[in-house]
């Protein structure tokens, strides 16, 4: 195994003995010997990517009393002492970062043990160093090393620390056939564990639970991808994704089902990419020491070609005039493709404005109250590939028969006719041009009614009582109070239809009294209101000039409502 050697040279200071002129035992004053670290990197070097020390490389050092455990036997409070080098080369002089923390050997000859690790970290908790390999940009920053040395005394001041790699390395060597270009290729390890703790007491690694897609460190000259990963994970749980500069994707799952990444070991896989079905020849499927020793196993595998594609299962959606919803199935390859979606019409909305990979996109349409067909365009734009457009068509309302108005002007298109039909009209009731269904004229109730009756009408000439339903449409909102409708009977009394809380289309049954409890909110849509008169049809007033229909509000309510097309069935 490749190793990093650090030689601890003990710079001897003279041992000074003090004596006294009195008889008896002579007290011995123990002077201590300062320790400096000379780090030499022998051949071959152990660093993950370089062949020499770099300036500002730092190690953490613990000094222990002879044979003691880290948790209880720290010598002279010397724990996690930072030593750095200012030189660059195969060997370097390491000096303590803080002179007050210099480690000194006891002058009485007591033995001292050492524990050291690389790279240095200020954040050591419970004698464990946090490890995070989610970024592979600087491999030396995550190439955790560990060393111990026992029994050092002032009489043998030279300390050789042999550092071992504690994580696991995986190397992917890319080869190709045909005209495939490997320049600027990217290699990603999917589902890799990214966190761990290095236990300083014994040098073991505690595997974490966080997983992520880890982008390997690429050498675009040698076409190799190197990743330092957490030991303890099964290689078969990793998926290797290779993306070429032209966007073509390959995916490979290692077939070494029983192999678990080992501390200090390096696994190398050579993948040969071909243009046809893209076979992968795994040459030297071996688990080597970090010094690239001879492999001890072979294997083979097949890559799944991953060409870039982005498709939708529909080019057009068709709806009836009613409100509705339908899904567009999106297929993205690779699954890392992101996309956005937009609609060019407000009546056609989307369940999501963006997404990643394959999935479904809901398209929702509101009711089309006009007789004309309408269209919208949904545009789905991927991060790679061409944008997709889906046409949405919605039919108009079919009207085989011209609706019959309940009383003259009750469709509000001829406002003068409406006003001539009503007996009284509250000041909150106004004419609203172009705000009705299909851009027609509507009745607008705005503000606080001056009295309960918004308007009342009388029976017109040649009137026939509706046999089944009275229908009208409403849009807008009311605050605190709702609306109520009075329909007068031949005996002079009236039945009531109460909207109460009205946020969806309902069929209202006749009631004995008015109620304004609740609020109206149509979410800016036209909602149909149906009064079921089938049980009282024969009782409805039909004598010309008598009271017929009244719309009522409440003096405690605030209204911003549009009413349109009061008709009968």
Image (cartoon, rainbow, N blue to C red):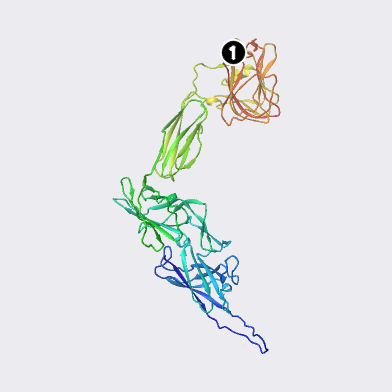
Residue furthest to the left: 178
Task: Give the residue displayed 47% in from the left and 37% down from the top.
Answer: 360
Foreground: 554 or 131? Answer: 131
Q: Looking at the figure, which quarter contains the C terminus?
A: top right
Compared to residue 88, the image places residue 30 above or below, namely below
Q: What is the x, y in percent for residue 213?
A: 46, 51
Q: Looking at the figure, which quarter contains the N terminus?
A: bottom left
Residue 409 in view of the camera: no
Compared to residue 84, the image places residue 346 above or below, namely above
Foreground: 313 or 147? Answer: 147
Foreground: 139 or 129? Answer: 129
Residue 235 in view of the camera: yes
Left or right of 43 on screen, residue 155: right
Disc 1 residue crowd, few under 14, some 14–19, many 20+, Cα 10 Å: some
Task: Give the residue displayed 41% in from the left and 59% down from the top.
Answer: 266
**Total marks drawn?**
1
Compared to residue 476, the image places residue 542 above or below, namely above
Q: What is the x, y in percent for residue 287?
A: 40, 58
Residue furthest to the bottom: 21
* Mark 1, secondary structure of its residue: loop
Q: What is the x, y in percent for residue 493?
A: 70, 14
Left or right of 502 on screen, residue 338: left
Circle 1 is placed at which residue position? 467
Q: What is the x, y in percent for residue 430?
A: 62, 25
């Amino acid at each position: 195994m490749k190793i990093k050697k650090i030689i601890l040279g003990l710079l001897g200071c003279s041992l000074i003995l003090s004596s006294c002129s009195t008889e008896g035992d002579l007290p011995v004053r123990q002077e201590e010997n300062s320790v400096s670290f000379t780090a030499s990197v022998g051949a071959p070097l152990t660093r993950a990517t370089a062949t020499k020390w770099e300036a500002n490389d730092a190690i953490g050092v613990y000094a222990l009393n002879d044979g003691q455990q880290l948790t209880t036997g720290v010598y002279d409070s010397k724990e996690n002492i930072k030593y750095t080098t200012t030189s660059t080369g195969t060997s370097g002089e390491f000096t303590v970062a803080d002179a007050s923390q210099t480690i000194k050997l006891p002058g009485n000859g007591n033995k001292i043990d050492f524990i050291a690790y690389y790279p240095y970290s200020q954040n050591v908790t419970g004698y464990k160093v946090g490890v995070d390999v989610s970024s592979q940009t600087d491999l030396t920053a995550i190439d955790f090393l560990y060393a111990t040395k026992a029994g050092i005394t002032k009489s043998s001041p030279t300390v050789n620390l042999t550092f071992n790699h504690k994580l696991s390395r995986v190397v992917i060597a890319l080869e190709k056939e045909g005209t495939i270009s490997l320049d600027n290729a990217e290699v990603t390890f999917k589902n890799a564990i990214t966190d761990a703790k290095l236990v300083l007491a014994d040098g073991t690694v505690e595997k974490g639970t966080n997983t992520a897609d880890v982008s390997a460190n690429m050498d675009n000259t040698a076409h190799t991808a190197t990743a330092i990963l957490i030991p303890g994970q099964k290689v078969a749980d990793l998926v290797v994704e290779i993306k070429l500069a032209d966007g073509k994707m390959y995916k490979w799952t290692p077939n070494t089902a029983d192999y678990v990444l080992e501390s200090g070991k390096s696994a190398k896989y050579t993948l040969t990419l071909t243009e046809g079905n893209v076979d992968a020849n795994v040459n030297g499927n071996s688990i080597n020491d970090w010094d690239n020793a001879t492999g001890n196993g072979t294997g083979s595998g097949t890559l799944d070609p991953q060409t870039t594609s982005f498709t939708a299962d529909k080019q057009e959606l068709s709806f009836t005039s009613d409100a509705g919803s339908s899904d567009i199935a999106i297929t993205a390859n690779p699954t890392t493709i992101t996309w956005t979606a937009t609609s060019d019409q407000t009546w056609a909305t989307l369940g999501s404005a963006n997404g990643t990979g394959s999935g479904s996109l809901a398209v929702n349409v509101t009711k089309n109250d006009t007789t004309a067909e309408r269209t919208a365009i949904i545009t789905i734009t991927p991060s790679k590939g061409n944008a997709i457009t889906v046409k949405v068509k919605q039919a108009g309302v079919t009207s085989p028969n011209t609706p019959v108005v309940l009383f003259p002007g009750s469709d509000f298109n001829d406002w003068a006719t409406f006003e001539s039909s009503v007996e009284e009209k509250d000041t909150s009731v106004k004419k609203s041009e172009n705000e009705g269904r299909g851009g027609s004229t509507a009745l607008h109730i705005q503000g606080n009614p001056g009295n309960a009756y918004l308007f009342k009408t009388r029976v017109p000439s040649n009137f026939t009582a509706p046999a089944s339903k009275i229908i009208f449409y409403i849009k807008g909102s009311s605050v605190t109070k709702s609306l109520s409708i009075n329909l007068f009977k031949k005996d002079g009394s009236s039945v009531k239809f109460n909207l109460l809380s009205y946020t969806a289309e309902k069929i209202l049954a006749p009631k004995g009294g008015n109620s304004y409890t609740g609020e109206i909110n149509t979410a800016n849509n036209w909602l149909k209101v149906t009064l079921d008169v089938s049980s009282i049809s024969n009782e409805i007033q039909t004598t010309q000039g008598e009271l017929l229909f009244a719309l009522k509000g409440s003096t405690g309510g605030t209204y911003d409502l549009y009413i349109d097309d009061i008709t009968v069935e």
